[in-house]
Amino acid sequence: MTSTLDAAQSSATGTPPKNKPQGKDDGADEKAISKSRTDLLDAEGDLSPAFHLALARIFLRFSASAQKLGLDLPNAAAAASEKDVGAQLDKLKKVALDDDELDAFARATNGEVLSDESKEEIKEYLDCDDQSRITFSGFCEMYHLQTGSDAAETWKDLEALGFNEKLELDSPLKADASKEERST
């Protein structure tokens, strides 16, 4: 998530980051890994359906208001029809992440909360509701920008959140695991 805000700023001008493959991993070592990974972006440069679903699962995990919707999202995009998934994702348009939830997400992916400056940049460049909370659309924008400029960073986030190379939730989120450790 580190390069997301830089990407958001360059995106505000409509110019994608230069000399970076869109949604592909960099480096020779990463090329072998990326062949087995699900594409994050489709041929048009939009979020792939599987990545969009993974982002919905992440957003749902950190947003208390989204959890109240009682959505039952499948583990992988292939597990349900696009129509069924699309109808459930439409419900996420009504919810957002507040600062505490955004901090919990940042801790789970990067080990620390976002700076006040980073939060202000999110509010300025990404879709937020009337209470300045990042919406699901803004969350997807954030990852679209990051993935376009540094897919390897996105994969690090996904791995930290328990997703495998097929974008399936493979293990509990580290945030959940640390909660369990504290309660024992």
Image (cartoon, grey):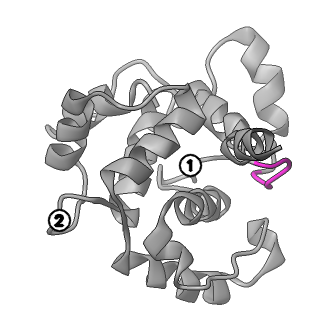
Identify which amino acid the numbered label 2 is placed on.
Gln
Query: Is residue 137 shown above or below 84?
Result: above
Side of 79 where 17 appears, left or right: left
Query: As drawn, is 145 to the left or to the right of 164?
Result: left
Q: Quadrant of residue 87?
A: bottom right
Q: Identify which amino acid the numbered label 1 is placed on.
A: Leu
Specify start and end residues of the magenta stretch as a single range: 167-172
Q: Which residue is mark 1?
A: 41
Residue for point 80% across, 71% down? 78
Q: Quadrant of residue 116?
A: top left
Disc ID at residue 131: 2
Residue 163 to residue 71: above or below: above
Nearer to us: label 2 or label 1: 2
In this rendered view, identify the residue nearer to me: 72 or 7.
72
Q: Residue at x 33, y 26 (%)?
A: 17
Q: How many marks?
A: 2
Q: Residue 84 versus residue 64: which sits nearer the camera?
A: 64
